[in-house]
Amino acid sequence: MNYLDGHCLVLAKVTEYGELYFLNCSTTNTRDIFTYNGMNAVGGITPRGSDPDNEWMGCFQGLRVLRYPIAETNSQGVVTRVRRRTNEEMREFGYSTEQYDIVQQLYTAHALEEDGMKPQSLHDLIRLRMKRVEQIAPASFIADYCDEILSAYLEREWFVQDAWNDVKKNGHIVYPEDLENENIFQALGRWETWSSPSSDVDRRNKYFYLADWMEYAVRMFGMQPNFIDLTGLESYNVNSQADLAAAMITEKNRWFQTKSLDYTHSSGKIYTLTLADIEERLYDLSFDPNHPPELRWGAPEGSEERENMPQSYTPLPKGAKMAMDEAYKLQYFYRTLCQRETSSSYLRGMYTEGFPIRDKLDAQVSKWSYLTEPLLHKEEPEPVEIIVPVEAEKPPSLTPPEVVTQPQAGERPTGRRDPRARMGGRSLR
């Protein structure tokens, strides 16, 4: 469980890579904003000892175990009430204050170490301890995951065509503007059936998961290089976190340029979009079923794709009609969201700038380009001593061959050269 800005997040899932995901257990109407938040939600944990009068002040914001319930009974064994255990009653289950000491260490020393590795944050430490896989292979993961992304958008094309056929057959669909119990993400009737703001959020999140996974790989490479299987990336000569980030981006782009789908234009013509095209149009794909297929697929303004596009409109709850181009422009904010909203949705007077938009994958992952320190050090082979065998009766020759005058018995050698050896070196002494 984690406390976040008035909300209580309950741990719902731990992935094989050690990533945590939470469900919001608040009862407020903003509860779904935090649904399936990752570890980005686990922040603001107070370092132990921040308050001189109470070393645990503010530490309730960490990851905590829920207080287990306990039943109270009367003398006949009948349950009279169920309540949460007190602090003292929870002691028997054990507890740890390590996370607050870790945050304090980060705050003071700006460094951590775990089994010889150096995680850069509490989140990195959690990933290290919670992961269940021994190794990951980015090249094969990226190739397989690109197929998953393509499959998600292929399904979207079938849905877009069915929605456009319904509009042509049954008329335009009312946009749920400024309604108390409905919005574009959760409505009633035909809008709920044929619009795609919710499923488009899911597809954007599927795309961004690849970016987050790549960043996970880069982080882990910095802490534990052998955790990354570089099979398939040999040509990139990966030796640093920056190298790995660049290699994965290049691999992603290679697959994005080759994997494609076909969609049917309102004119009946078939257009081919690669995953690279869809990535370029990520925030331009219309969710409004009143828009023709080419606008649902984000055809660029002024392009041949948009030529002769039928002019449609979006009806509003009280009978007003908004021209297609104006509605498309004013829906931009909702096309950039990566989570569903639970409050009312708007169209007239909607702002079209001044709000944060998440960087796409290349921009996100390339931020690791500054980490160029080599992490893989090739071991130099130990020198091998080569022994040249020599004959036992003769010492090895250390000087150029020359002839030396041999002394007679009882004489000392003179050291003079034999006149026949005019071109030799110094004599042996």
Image (cartoon, rainbow, N blue to C red):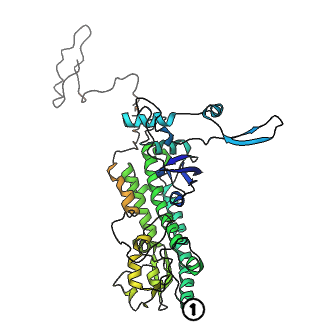
Can residue 292 be seen here? The reply is yes
Could you tell whether 412 is left or right of 99 in the image? left
- What residue is shown at x 41% (from left), y 70% (from top)? 333
Residue type at the position of mark 1: Lys
Quarter the C terminus occupies: top left
Residue at 51%, 40% in the rendered image: 60
Q: Is residue 122 above or below residue 260?
A: above
Q: Nearer the viewer, residue 270 or 283?
A: 283
Question: Residue placed farthest to the top in the image?
Answer: 410
Q: Nearer the viewer, residue 67 or 132?
A: 67
**Up/down of 394 relative to 150, above or below:** above
**Residue in the image at 56% along x and 46% along y:** 1
Badge 1 density bin: few <14, some 14–19, many ≥20, Cα 10 Å: few
Tell me the element at label 1: helix
Location of residue 245 in the rendering, given as x and y in whole percent from the top left corner: 40, 55
Spot occupied by residue 137 in the image (x, y as percentages of width and height): 51, 54
Tell me residue 54's x, y (percent): 45, 30
| Residue at the spot 41% in from the left edge and 53% down from the top edge | 244
> Which residue is identified by label 1?
169
- Up-down relation of residue 302 to residue 260 (above or below): below
The mark total stands at: 1
The answer, for residue 116, to whether it is visible in the render is: no
Q: What is the x, y in percent for residue 68?
A: 66, 41
Query: Closer to the camera, 302 or 333?
Result: 333
| Closest to the observer, 408 or 305 | 305
